[in-house]
Every structure is written in C-alpha cells, then in structure tokens.
Amino acid sequence: MADALYGDDAEPGEPSPAGLLCVPVRPGAEGCVTRLFRTPVGGRTAVAFTDADRLTAVLGAAQPWIVLAEPALRALMEPLGIHELRIDPVLTAPTPAVTIAAVSDPRPRPLAALVK
C-alpha cells in the first residue's frame, strides 16, 4: 500500500520537512533579510515556495529570493518568535490600485433640514 504511514512520516497537522525552499527576501544593512508576512488574522508568518515559478506567480518577477532548507528557515524565525511557515501560499490579496477622488467643493454645506 503506497499511502501507508511509516514511523518517520509526519502526522496530519504536524510540520513536515519541505526540502529546499525559495524564500523571499529584501535588502538589509548586512545583506538580505527574510520578508515576513501577515496571516488573515494578523499573525506574523514566514512564507516560502517549493520552486521559483510559484514565488514569481505570487510575488512577481522583481521579488528577490534565496534558497534555504526548511529547518534553516525555521531556525532563523525562532528568535523572532515566529513559529508559522506558509509554504506555497496562493491566496493573496492583489496590490490595491491607487486612486485619487476629485473633490469639487471642500467647504462644508449646511443640512437642508436646518436651513429655512
């Protein structure tokens, strides 16, 4: 049976090694710094991708990245108190478009009910 669990397989809900990961980074004072993200409920999380194409599809071609093993990424996040790692996230909000609404007359107007 190919789907049988063996002694070293992770149980559902337990973190399992993902191998080498593409980790988004940003420039820092001493080199590159791992980018951190927010979960939908506001918690901080590290994000990684199993290949460069997935990273590019979510974060764009201009996003710099490095290759790290999952244990190394978790070890980097531990001192920051970040225990969550999202691998291959696909549900991301698009960058909001910047629009400027035109204001025709910025002066306050009296309410019609108060004017007689």
Image (cartoon, rainbow, N blue to C red):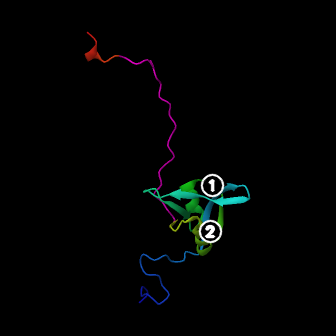
Q: Position of residue 27 (x, y in %)?
A: 69, 55
Picture disc at residue 63? 1
Q: Is residue 51 above or below residue 58?
A: below
The magenta segment is 87-109
- Please tell me whether mark 1 or mark 2 is closer to you in this view: 2
Q: Which residue is mark 2?
A: 76
Callout 1 amino acid = Gln
Q: Main secondary structure of the magenta part?
A: loop
Give me the residue at 52% from left, 37% from top. 98
Callout 2 amino acid = Leu
Say few, some or many: other residues with alpha carbon within 10 Å of mark 2 (under 14 / 14 to 19 / 20 or more): some
Q: Position of residue 63 (x, y in %)?
A: 63, 55
Placement of the C terminus among the 4 image quadrants: top left
Q: Is residue 102 left or right of residue 61?
A: left
Q: Secondary structure at mark 1?
A: loop
Q: Secondary structure at mark 2?
A: helix
Q: Position of residue 46 (x, y in %)?
A: 55, 63
Give me the residue at 62% from left, 73% from top. 72
Residue 104 location, quadrant = top left
Q: Is residue 4 above or below residue 71?
A: below
